[in-house]
Amino acid sequence: MTNAMTKVLAICLEDVLAEDPDKRYLCCTVKNGRSGGLSVDNKGTTQWMVDKNPAFQLFFTREDTLGLYRLKNGAAVQVRRGRRTLDAPFEKPVILRHKDELVIAGRHYRVHVHGEVKHTYAPYFFKQQISNVAAATVLGAALTLGACSTVDGDTPPNASADTDTNADGDTGTDTDTYTDTFTDAYADTDTGTGTGALAVDTDTETDTDTIDVRLTPPE
């Protein structure tokens, strides 16, 4: 269990280039501070609770926002927001927003910020459930998605989040057996519907606000 001083943010990393729809959305959590748990290595692979050549870490900032911290010698990562782009500097936090995009080592992620939750859990891939109607018009319609269930606790197994290890894989952890769904966090961020479904927006991002950089590293 996380302690009273720990703050946890639920997010999803959408692999924009994924060919398998069941490997497109990675449900994740990040914590405050440098020990946020979630990182991306120099090859663009997501990692959880491991420290193998991380290019950058994602963490929950003091401002209750999502932060990206590129480590010294970390691979180049570009942050995109509408028509704005920023090459993330070394060792200076970049403040991310819902639907910002991250490009690193040929990988392309879109960030979905869902909200604060009580506990951390190991990353797992979201299994899409597309209705017959949506399947017929998938290029022009929103996806119909089911609820996300979670693994309660902040000491998940050490594994690459790019594998099925934490998503009904060979660790013996079946996320479908967990009923502690974070309904509020996975409500539609834009509409506030509170359905408990994974929020995925299909509109085009037009926000051109400046991408903020902080001078002080996370503690």
Image (cartoon, helix red, strand yellow):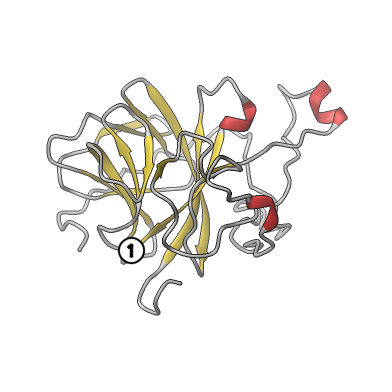
- Quarter of the image containing the C terminus? bottom left
Where does the image place residue 186, in percent across and percent down from the top left?
A: 62, 55
Q: For mark 1, give the secondary structure.
A: loop
Category of crowding for the residue at label 1, using alpha-carbon neighbours closer than 10 angstroms: few (below 14), some (14–19), many (at least 20): many
Kind of residue at disc 1: Asn
Could you tell me which residue is drawn at 69 percent across and 56 percent down? 177
Where does the image place residue 138, in percent across and percent down from the top left? 74, 24
The answer to which quarter of the image holds residue 164 is: top right
The answer to whether 119 appears left or right of 47 in the picture is: right
Q: Is residue 196 above or below residue 50?
A: below
Judge left or right: residue 80 versus residue 26: left
Q: Which residue is mark 1?
A: 32
Residue 129 rendering spot, x and y as whole percentages: 75, 37
Instruction: State the residue in front, 171 or 27.
Output: 171
Which residue ends up furthest to the right in the rendered image?
Answer: 132
Q: Residue at x 57, y 43 (%)?
A: 167
15 above or below 4? above
Q: Which residue is nearer to you in this view: 215 or 3?
A: 3
